[in-house]
Image (cartoon, rainbow, N blue to C red):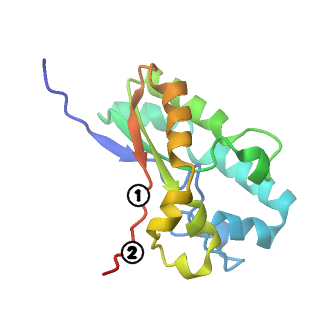
Amino acid sequence: MARSIIKGTNLSGWLVLEPWITPSLFESTGAITSDQLAVELGPKTYAELEVKHRKSFITEADFTQMEARGFNAVRLPLPWRVFQEAAYSYTDSLSTMDFVDMSFEWGQAHEIKILLDIVVNPEAEMRPEEQEGFVSVSSRLRTPLLEVMGELAAKYAHNPAFLGIESLNDPMAQTR
């Protein structure tokens, strides 16, 4: 079997809003997470901002450029609640999964594999003492991570653009 070299890039800041990637979305609020941004802006304004951002930040034209530059893989960060948006979402139009589906269509069309990366832990979003980016063992155990990974695998594992799933890349606090 021939070895394939993975030449990849990252789609951070698209489906998980992050202030260090798109500071302009956060600058007037002082928020450091998308949940805080939603509270600061209010549901309607946040929904409009999120949809406008998602429709323009990454498009099929970006996949065309990646293919032209020789990339064959992308890392696609997702929130843990990707399947539970009804309880958390501020948007009424396109869901996160609609954009994930688009990325798989584009990936397949441009021969780019997609590594799904669940990057946001619910406890890290909600607990002020963990806002520095450290996630405790107990919060990892409460995350419905296996269910989310199972649903993602069931939906995409047979798609030719599927590369894999990475779970919670948050740093973990070490205790002795």
- Labels 2 and 1 touching (C-beta < 8 A): no
Q: Which residue is at the front of the view, 92 or 86?
A: 86
Q: Which residue is at the front of the view, 31 or 119?
A: 119
In this rendering, position of residue 92 left or right of residue 103: right
Q: Quadrant of the N terminus?
A: top left
Residue type beneath disc 1: Asn
Residue type beneath disc 2: Ala
- Foreground disc of the pair 2, 1: 2
Q: At which x and y percent is residue 145?
A: 52, 48
Residue position marked by numbered label 1 in the rendering = 169
Q: Which residue is at the front of the view, 52 or 171?
A: 171
Q: Is residue 60 visible?
A: no
Q: Is residue 14 visible?
A: yes
In this rendering, position of residue 37 left or right of residue 18: right
Local secondary structure at mark 1:
loop
Cα separation between marks 2 and 1:
12 Å
Q: At which x and y percent is residue 114?
A: 42, 34
Q: Residue at x 83, y 43 (%)?
A: 92
Residue position marked by numbered label 2 in the rendering = 173
Alpha-carbon neighbours of circle 1 within 10 Å: few (<14), some, or many (≥20)?
A: few
Q: Residue at x 51, y 69 (%)?
A: 20
Local secondary structure at mark 2:
loop
Q: At which x and y percent is residue 86?
A: 78, 45
In this rendering, position of residue 90 left or right of residue 114: right
Q: Residue at x 48, y 38 (%)?
A: 62
Q: Quadrant of the C terminus?
A: bottom left
Q: At which x and y percent is residue 89?
A: 76, 51
Residue 90 vertical position relative to residue 72 in the rendered view, above or below:
below
Q: Residue at x 59, y 29 (%)?
A: 101
In this rendering, position of residue 26 left or right of residue 65: right
